[in-house]
Amino acid sequence: MPLPLNPDMARTFPPPVMEARRWLDGVTFPPDRPLINVSQAAPMEPPPEGLRQALAEAAINDPAAHLYGPVLGLPALRDEVAAQWSAAYGGEIAAGEVAITQGCNQAFCAVMATIARAGDEVILPTPWYFNHKMWLDMQGIAAVPLPTGPGLIPEAEATARLVTERTRAIVLVTPNNPGGVEYPAATLRAFYELAQARGIALILDETYRDFDSRAGAPHDLFADPDWRGTLVHLYSFSKAYRLTGHRVGAIVADRARLAEVEKFLDTVAICPSQLGQIGALWGMRNLGQWVAGERAEILARRAAMTAGIARLEGWRLLGCGAFFAYVEHPCPVAAPELARRLVREAGVLLLPGTMFMPEGDPAGARQLRIAFANVGVAGVGALIDRLAAFRA
């Protein structure tokens, strides 16, 4: 007799990136046409040498780097985040309002565990970040889809009509995953005011903030003295400092919320990776110019992607920014089949829009996500050439 299975876990879809990797099984790629993998938005190179040296020195010379640390993270890193975020956003954030987590996905899960329980509702704009949807499914929390339309920018007015007595939070990701769009400051302000008026949380995931194309702060929400109790901010150190394997993320929220978050973190990880935190702190203190160069490179790839999609007949760019392009394809087959065929026939691995949309939503069948952060400008050009040559 099989062991019992939580039905909420059973109804959650498989991890999309892992599912897509299985499409590579049994497929060979000739030397003159290697695989172009634009399925996952994660740096594929190690951190810069200075950061790696800092990690090595800590591993050898700092005994505390191998022990349990504070559940909410190293005080020095919390101090640094508070200081830099206060300066960047023009607000006041205290170290006690920062928690460090094992990556940004854990930050989301930890916060959501303190906000909603089975039977509650959380509003997610579509196309949504699939790991957010998966966590809500596994907890028995209803993910209420908020269609964003062809511009991929959600509207607070439309969202207000979705709020019920069971709504606990609205989740926004900007720059967006999967859409790439950068939400205007006015949009974020409107959502903040809606959440505040309805007594629900606004969870703002800014994992890709370091690659925003705009100068200055992307919003002024932390400048509002009443942000505490409404705004919860999430961040990842993985993208800016190439620390994906070390799993370091952050939460900014009021102290009462973090006291509840601490309960969750203590039961699932006890503390974040000490070495990962040491690397993140070193990066924040020493890699400002290097990150600026990384941002410039990503913006160059973004420009190449925008120009490339424009020369593909029938293709339409819905959003492009940070690590992503989100496109509408003209092919006579649905996106899931198209994505599998592109692996075999064009040597391209990308994700279909159905992985980011509610089941049965017809828009997903016409859409694809291209994570171009893993290929240079020349790689973007090669990708566009293969898509142009492909015949469905």
Image (spheres, rainbow, N blue to C red):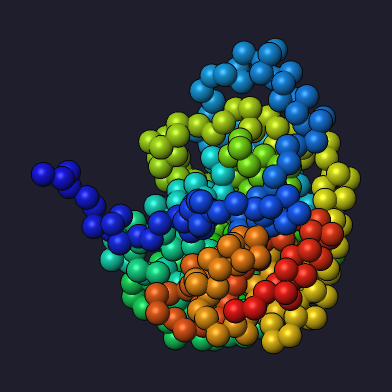
Residue 65, image x, y percentages = 61, 20
**Residue at point 30% right, 61% down?**
11
**Residue at point 73% right, 41% down?**
45
Q: Quadrant of residue 2?
A: top left
Residue 1, image x, y percentages = 11, 44
Residue 156 in view of the camera: no
Q: Quadrant of the C terminus?
A: bottom right
Q: Is residue 337 above or below residue 236?
A: below
Image check: 6 left or right of 248? left
Residue nearest the observer in this picture, 36 or 301? 36
Q: Is residue 240 above or below residue 353?
A: above
Total numbered badges shown on the rendered structure: 0
**Residue at point 73% right, 85% down?**
313
Q: Is residue 156 above or below residue 266?
A: below
Q: Quadrant of residue 282?
A: top right
Residue 86, image x, y percentages = 73, 51
**Residue at point 40% right, 56% down?**
14
Residue 6, image x, y percentages = 24, 52
